[in-house]
Amino acid sequence: MKRIKAVLSMLFLGTLFADQIESVSGGTVMNITMSLQDMLMKWAVTLGWIFVASIGFAFGVGVSIKVFDLLSVGIDEWEEVKKGNIVVGGIIITLIVMIGLIILKIL
C-alpha cells in the first residue's frame, strides 16, 4: 500500500511540475500549459504502458526460464534450489536480470 501511495504521489508531483513546461525551439522559449484532461490522459497512457511492459516482462522471463530448463538436461535446477544450492539460485537470478536488461535495451 505504501508503494502505491508513493507512485501516485510521484505521478502527481511530476505532472504538477510539468504543468508549466518551457521548451526552447529555434532559440525562442515557448511556454506550454497543460490542462487537467491532458494530464489525466498522460497518466492513463503511462499506466497502460506500465501494464503492458509488466505482462511482457513476466512472459519473457517465464519463457526464458523454461528454455533454460529444457537446455540444461540432467539437472533439476528447482530441486537444487530447494536443497539450498546457492550457485544454481545465482544462475537463475542472473538469467532473470539479463532478460530484464535485454528487454530494457529493446524498449
Image (cartoon, rainbow, N blue to C red):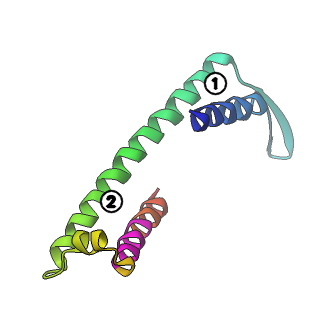
Q: Amino acid at mark 2?
A: Val
Q: Residue at x 47, y 66 (%)?
A: 101
| Mark positioned earlier in the residue sequence (2 or 1) | 1
Numbered disc 1: secondary structure: helix
Horizontal side of 51 relative to 7 (left or right) equals left
Q: Check disc 1: other Cα within 10 Å, few if <14, some if 14-19, many if 20+.
A: some
The residue labelled by disc 2 is 61
The residue labelled by disc 1 is 39
In the rendered image, residue 43, in percent from the top left (x then y), is placed at 57, 29
- Displayed quadrant of residue 100: bottom left
Q: Amino acid at mark 1?
A: Met
- Displayed quadrant of residue 81: bottom left
Q: CA distance from mark 2 to mark 1?
A: 33 Å
In the picture shown, does residue 94 fall above or below 47? Answer: below
In the rendered image, residue 73, in percent from the top left (x then y), is placed at 14, 81
Numbered disc 2: secondary structure: helix
Q: Residue at x 13, y 82 (%)?
A: 74
Q: Residue at x 39, y 65 (%)?
A: 96
Please provide the residue range marked out in magenta: 88-97
Is residue 91 located in the magenta-colored stretch of the structure? yes
